Amino acid sequence: MAKQKEIKTNAMRILDKHKIDYQVIQYECDEFIDGLHTAEKTGAPVEQSYKTLVLIGKSGQHYVLVLPIAYEVHLKNAARLFGEKSVEMIHVKDITAVTGYVRGGCSPLGMKKQFPTWIHESAEKYDKIYVSGGRIGTTLVLSPQDLAKVTGASFGAFCMEDGEEDQ
């Protein structure tokens, strides 16, 4: 009986090309589920599980943020990081056109274009973090430093504190 060949995503191919060590976690899922449910399904620690958000600035430039799944982005802080007057989340209907990925399967690796990327500073305290593998039902586990290296990302603070509102 032939061994089933693992289907690689763009994210995995990029990590392989750069000889970066990573693990793949596959889980059953037919449609979008949020990061908290994904962590629950995979057994990944919630605090080490990160989501990928794509924003667009006033200039029309796209940006990528990688942040803990339980956090919300502070748009003013994100705009400051990117040197923009303001930023907003891209519309759900635009995710595939901009990134090449579907909602719930958007990885910070392997998008159609490499956009300026920031990873939340909390990731630096972990040896490994969990991010989307570029397909619904696929999670990648890798070092945050390796993720930053391959995406050209910086680490920074751009999330809201508990009770804080984005004005």
Image: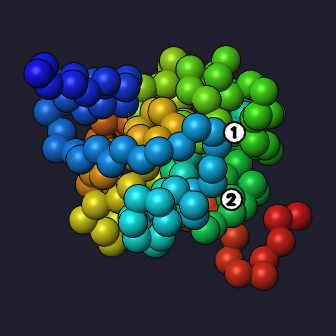
Q: Say which residue appears at 63% left-offset and 67% top-offset.
A: 71
Report, in whole angstroms, how far the alpha carbon at label 2 lies from the one at label 1: 10 Å
Q: Say which residue appears at 14% left-offset and 25% top-offset.
A: 3
Q: Say which residue appears at 29% left-offset and 44% top-offset.
A: 24
Q: Say which residue appears at 83% left-offset and 71% top-offset.
A: 165
- Give 15 or 145, whichever is nearer the viewer: 15
Query: Label 2 amino acid?
Result: Val
**Labelled disc at residue 73:** 2
Residue 99 position, x and y percent, is 58, 24
Query: Label 1 amino acid?
Result: Leu
Callout 2 secondary element: loop
The answer to which image quadrant residue 100 occupies is top right
Asked if residue 71 can be seen in this view, the reply is: yes
The answer to which image quadrant residue 45 occupies is bottom left
Callout 1 secondary element: strand
Q: How is the image coloured?
A: rainbow
Which residue is denoted by mark 1 in the rendering?
Answer: 55
Residue 77 position, x and y percent, is 68, 59
